[in-house]
Amino acid sequence: MYVKKIFYLVACCLVIGACSKKDPILPGDRTPVFATGEIVVKNKAIPDGMIAMQATGSTPPTSAFIQDADNIIWEIPTVGDKRRVFSGLPTTSRVNIERVPAYANGFVYAGLSTGELVKVNVRTRQLVWIADIFKESALTGGASLLDIVAPVQIVGNAVYVGGLGDAMCRVRDRDGHKVWCNPIGVGVPFVVAGEVVFVVATDGHLYAINASDGAIFWRTRVARQSAPVLSDDMIITVGRERFKATDGNKI
């Protein structure tokens, strides 16, 4: 019976279409996947004062954290042997890339290749919550990759995460509840700048998203999928291209 259960769980990881919303990849309480919707772009400039260079308020960790290809998170202390903090289920549907979990105030946050975001208490190694970061349509075979490869960002009481399962989300740090999700795939690091999130999506666009409600101010086509860089003069650089952060116009 045990072997049969493990086989079923692994099959869910590899073939998402075989699972229902009531049969999560990882057990435990979780928020449901967000419903598939259309991308709505307001095509308007960002109001003054919303964009700001973001400062991190996290407590520095006393250890380093790494995440291996099998969704296992390890703590590497300054003294002593490494310690396993969390074990997720492995899957062959993943991107071969080095992963570094985010850390804030005694908790580690990691995006898994199974499309889930987890928050783990480092001291107790207990799983605090799980959030599914992929569209509902992915459960019926809508996506071949659900991997979360862009670094997770924690800003105040908000956690920002984007995945290859066509999802860019803000979730509450307290319980993992989704504040908003947009149906855009994310495969490179993004920028949280005050009240705006700048994301280069897998559809070849740079998006400016309202951090409070997920509304999209504007989007513009980019030549390559590279991590956006915001400068003090409110210019966003993507590869060799430069855009005005306020309205997305190319410079």
Image (cartoon, rainbow, N blue to C red):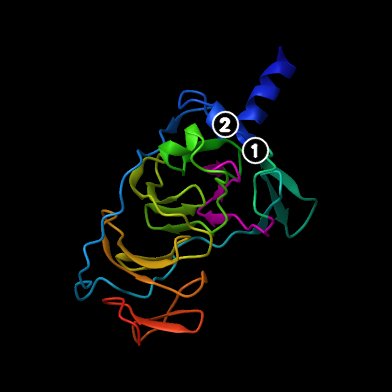
Q: Which residues are magenta?
A: 96-120
Binning the other alpha carbons within 10 Å of mark 1 as few (below 14), some (14 to 19) or many (20 upward) gives some
Q: Quadrant of the N terminus?
A: top right
Q: Is residue 106 magenta?
A: yes
Q: Could you say which disc has been placed on residue 233 in the image?
A: none
What is the count of numbered marks? 2
Residue nearest the viewer, comparing 167 with 158: 167
Q: Earlier in the sequence, mark 2 or mark 1?
A: 2
Amino acid type at circle 2 is: Leu
Q: Is residue 166 above or below residue 57?
A: above
Q: Is residue 4 above or below residue 238?
A: above
Tell me whether circle 2 and circle 1 mark residues in contact (CB < 8 Å): yes
Amino acid type at circle 1 is: Gly
- Residue 2, given in percent of the width and then of the height, sits at 72, 16
In the rendered image, the residue lying farthest to the top is 1
Q: Could you say which disc has been placed on residue 88 in the image?
A: 1
- Residue 45, given in percent of the width and then of the height, sits at 21, 73
Residue nearest the viewer, comparing 139 with 125: 139
Look at 26% across and 53% down and name the residue there: 213
Left or right, 126 with reference to 55: right
- Residue 208, given in percent of the width and then of the height, sits at 33, 67
Q: Is residue 175 above or below residue 238?
A: above
Left or right, 224 with reference to 47: right
Q: Is residue 170 above or below residue 85?
A: below
The kind of secondary structure element at disc 2 is loop
Distance, label 2 to label 1, CA atoms, is: 8 Å
Q: Is residue 228 magenta?
A: no
Q: Quadrant of the C terminus?
A: bottom left
- Residue 115, given in percent of the width and then of the height, sits at 54, 43
Residue nearest the viewer, comparing 173 with 21: 21
**Where does label 2 land, which residue?**
26
